[in-house]
Image (spheres, rainbow, N blue to C red):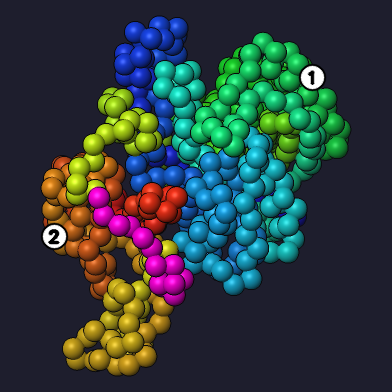
Amino acid sequence: MVGIVAYGAYVPRLRLQRQAVYDANKWFAPNLRGQAKGERSMANWDEDSVTMAVEAARDCLGEVDAKSLRNLHFASTTLPFKDRQNAGVIAAALTVEQGLMASDVAGSQKAGTSALIASLRSADSGPSMVVASDKRLTRVASAAELQYGDAAAAFLCGTDKVIAKLVATHSVSMDFIDHFRGDESDFDYGWEERWIRDEGYLKIVPPAVKAALAAANLKGADIAHFIMASLMPAVPKQMAKMSGIAETAVRDALSDRLGDTGTAHPLVMLAHTLETAKAGERIMVLGFGQGLDVIILEATGELAKLPKRMGVSGWLARRKAETNYLKFLAFNEMLPIDKGMRAEFDKKTALSILWRKRDMIYGLVGGKCRVCGTVQFPKSQVCVNPNCHAVDSQDDYRMSGLEASVMSFTADSLTYSPDPPAWYGMITFPEGGRFMADFTDCDKEQVKVGAKMRMTFRIRDNDQMRGGFKRYFWKATPV
């Protein structure tokens, strides 16, 4: 039986309050008043599509050994690198390389569902993962600025202990352009809503859903959960009605708490659905964008046995309201602020060292001595234990999944940070090993000696002198 065997998600901690956006822009765009309700997720300055994808993948894998993966599909329209395999960065962070077929899937809002279909179809050859993540830029004072959000979702596909078996898929490809983002622009350009609804959704979705139901030998009434992401709230209900699917089956799009997360959104909604789905319930997932993907799944009894994870609800609960609209603009490089002289230093990355030390840098892999059991970071040829000093005795010891504690810390207001002050300090791990780490997603009252921290994969800095080479590393964040 082929299907989904695990799911995970990630939502950034910050939630930009839409009222704050409206208050700043109402002098120019009073028409946004009707959308100034609720909040949208907002990536921190050190988060992008790759870092969010890594967190979602970790949430999905749980105790599963990432080295068992055979395929990794990364779907996004906001890939940090145009010519570098972004899925490879995710694989390196998960410390999986050998025997892995990694690929980037992009170019359409349905890239996430297309990648999921590919992942399900390749699951026969071994565990296959799909991760979808998007962090889209928006023009100041645009409706999209209020409607969009940032998030990621991940699914592990396989044939053992399937929690949602694949029933049927159906895809159509049509060059219907509801919006686009040209090579020379950072922003989406959308067409008129009525035309998109009448010429796009109404003519593309119902026939494709009908074909998928026919392939599964089902009727619309057999669908318990109907997942369709759309910036037009009434459209999913209209599509469900036209397909004979009950209105009660239409899933919450999470617009008021999260926003539309682009390529990731159908899969974010699927992850949210699996948190409460019951065995035997059928789930239909739609991915719209220059055509349509339709996926029909059926939850199994294994779903209730799946170990607990953060999931969409867990990450949504971990939130901090952000009312500083200028901070949102600055984090997204939309506000040319004076960073000061301390920001003026060369950030060139030695790619040769990055290659040789990739396990240490991207995987946070230290060493554990086979002779005395001492754990250390970084791994070295000689054990640091003064009573041991064994040579070539260390095995790889992955520290990214361990809980650390704060040994010492500082809040530095002198050094440059995109979000001052810069929090950093010495952290220690349960079995030993310590290093000086940057802190992120933390508030003053959370940082103290002994505070428990978890490691999270983040952007360390961006080499803008050489076209924007993002350097990634692990940071500590309060548990």
- Amino acid at pointer 2: Ser
Q: Quadrant of residue 201?
A: top right
The residue range painted magenta reads 344-359
Give the residue displayed 76% in from the left and 30% down from the top.
Answer: 175
Q: Is residue 131 above or below residue 283?
A: below
User: Residue placed at 13% from the left, 45% from the top?
Assistant: 413
Q: Amino acid at mark 1?
A: Lys
Is 56 on the left-hand or right-hand side of 449? right
Query: Relative to 244, does residue 334 appear above or below in the rendering?
Result: below
Residue at the location (67% across, 23% down)?
A: 178
User: In the displayed structure, does residue 438 sit left or right of residue 86?
Assistant: left
| Whole-percent x, y for residue 459 in the image | 37, 51
Using the numbered discs, state the Cα–Cα distance from disc 2 to disc 1 in whole angstroms. Answer: 61 Å
Residue 233: percent from the left, percent from the top?
A: 58, 17
How packed is label 1: few (under 14 Cα within 10 Å), some, or many (20 or more)?
A: few
Q: Quadrant of residue 240?
A: top right
Q: Which residue is mark 1?
A: 203
Question: Would you say residue 320 is visible in this rendering?
Answer: yes
Is 354 covered by the magenta stretch? yes
Q: For mark 2, what is the residue? A: 408
- Find out whether residue 405 is within the magenta segment: no
426 with respect to 453 (left or right)? left
Q: Position of residue 425 (x, y in %)?
A: 18, 58
Quadrant location of the N terminus? bottom right
| Pick the front one: 116 or 249 | 116
